[in-house]
Image (tube, grey):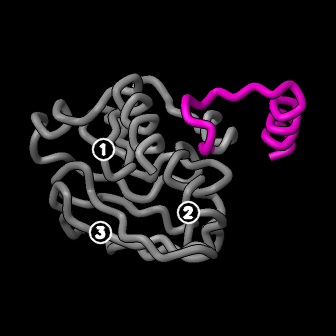
Amino acid sequence: MALRMWASSTANALKISCASKPHLSFSRCFSTVLDGLKYAESHEWVKHEGSVATIGITDHAQDHLGEVVFVELPEPGGSVSKGKGFGAVESVKATSDVNSPISGEIVEVNSKLSEAPGMINSSPYEEGWMIKVKPSSSSELESLMSSKEYTEFCEEEDASH
């Protein structure tokens, strides 16, 4: 956070911006997008390792939500369907449904989020993961965006708002 504030104030002093449109926030340019993950247009990420895929919301999404104060997660053993909601994230700004980018069986949920929902803000790709799923279709993984495609998608989406 201190780095974002410093970068923003420095950019303002130098009258520079990383955004193509002047109405965009400078801090949005610092959203982290990790290589090796797949991304959905609804701002969830998937990390596929072996027979399990870990799912969470992106840094871009948590940045737009603001401080996360509550997380609703499903029970292990259930199933998720691509594009359908499996939980919710409540922030100081709003409550948002979280959609699954893939279909499969839920094998684990991050129970630490019930006591520390802010991990979604501080570590969206590591400590803030939400569920682990045994994917039912590899083609669904292949249909998700790469890190480069997701970065371009976010830039276009932010420019249109």
For disc 1, the marked residue is 40
Residue 97 occupies which quadrant of the picture? bottom left
**Magenta-span inclusion, residue 5:** yes
Picture layout, residue 96 above or below residue 52: below
16 or 149, nearer to the observer: 16
Q: Earlier in the sequence, mark 1 or mark 2?
A: 1
Within-10-Å neighbours for mark 1: few <14, some 14–19, many 20+: many
Q: CA distance from mark 3 to mark 2?
A: 18 Å
Within-10-Å neighbours for mark 2: few <14, some 14–19, many 20+: some
Q: Position of residue 104 (x, y in %)?
A: 17, 54
Q: Residue at x 61, y 68 (%)?
A: 68
Residue 109 occupies which quadrant of the picture? bottom left
Picture layout, residue 150 above or below residue 135: above
Give the foreground label among 3 and 2: 2
For disc 2, the marked residue is 65
Which SS class for mark 1? loop
Residue 140 occupies which quadrant of the picture? top left
